[in-house]
């Protein structure tokens, strides 16, 4: 199975009302709307939440199924002029433009992905004053496909980007706990690694 086939199968069952990730809502609520890039947009909960709040969002995902469904949902909600859905294999192509916010939530995959390079491209795509928000798993949930996974800390992710400190500053590098619900209704305490980088 190819990467695209895997993620198309993952998104084959529609999500009735995709919700935004809680860390996005915590960080972004007080920011002035502008242009946003949602990397690995999936079902589209983050992109739709941002668009409802006045952001103009480019949503990028490897799954054509997810992208097609997100574009249709945005039109249904009257947000078609605020959401541009694009299919990208981020290991090969990256969305064009400059952004006030780039959001990458749980950009993990069982397939090869040059993650540090992708996130560096994300930082370089920021407008001056723009922010890169990276939220990663920091612990393994009981329903995770890889029970032996080890996730780098937010500081380790920041270092892996090799950004010039004169051009970017790390505003936050946190490990945060939350109560999560799995696909089968299971509940567990999990850890998120949150990295927030601002372009000077």
Image (spheres, rainbow, N blue to C red):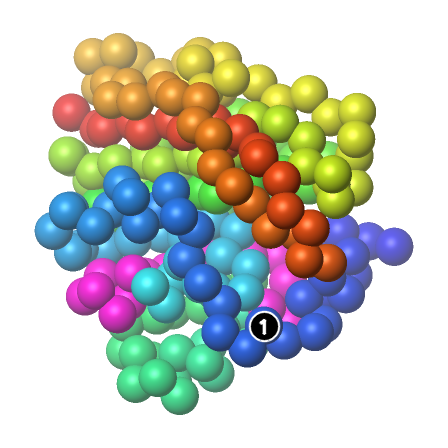
- Up/down of 195 relative to 93, above or below: above
**Picture coordinates of residue 166, whole percent (x, y):** 20, 12
**Residue at x 79%, y 25% (from the top left corner):** 148
Q: Which is nearer the eye, 97 or 141?
A: 141
Quadrant position of residue 80: bottom left
Q: How many marks?
A: 1
Q: Pick the quarter of the image with the N terminus.
A: bottom right
- Up/down of 182 relative to 54, above or below: above
- Up/down of 113 relative to 36, above or below: above
Magenta segment range? 50-66
**Picture coordinates of residue 135, whole percent (x, y):** 45, 35
Residue furthest front in the image = 187
Quadrant position of residue 144: top right
Please indicate whether residue 88 sits to the left or right of residue 182 in the image: left
Residue furthest right in the image = 1
Quick one: label 1, few (<14), some, or many (20+) residues within 10 Å?
few
**Residue at x 82%, y 53% (from the top left corner):** 2
Residue 110 seen in the figure: no
Residue 57 among magenta residues: yes
**Picture coordinates of residue 90, whole percent (x, y):** 56, 45
**Residue at x 38%, y 27% (from the top left corner):** 195
**Picture coordinates of residue 98, whole percent (x, y):** 26, 47
Q: Which residue is mark 1?
A: 15
Residue 16 seen in the figure: yes
Residue 20 among magenta residues: no
Please indicate whether residue 118 sits to the left or right of residue 124 in the image: right
């Amino acid at each position: 199975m190819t990467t695209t086939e895997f993620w198309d199968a993952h998104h084959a069952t529609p999500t009735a009302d995709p919700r935004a990730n809680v860390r996005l809502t915590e960080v972004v609520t007080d920011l002035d709307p502008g242009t946003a890039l949602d990397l690995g947009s999936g079902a589209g909960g983050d992109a739709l939440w941002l668009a409802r709040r006045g952001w103009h969002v480019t949503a990028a995902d490897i799954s054509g199924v997810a992208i097609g469904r997100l574009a249709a949902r945005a039109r249904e909600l009257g947000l078609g002029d605020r959401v541009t859905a694009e299919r990208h294999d981020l290991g090969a192509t990256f969305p064009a433009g400059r952004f006030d916010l780039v959001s990458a939530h749980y950009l993990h995959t069982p397939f090869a992905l040059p993650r540090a390079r992708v996130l560096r491209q994300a930082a370089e795509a920021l407008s001056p004053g723009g922010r890169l928000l990276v939220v990663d798993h920091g612990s393994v949930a009981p329903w995770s496909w890889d029970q032996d996974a080890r996730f780098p800390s937010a500081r380790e992710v920041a270092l892996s980007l090799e950004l010039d400190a004169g051009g970017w500053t790390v505003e936050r590098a946190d490990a945060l706990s939350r109560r999560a619900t799995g696909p089968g209704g299971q509940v567990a305490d999990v850890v998120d690694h949150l990295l927030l980088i601002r372009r000077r």
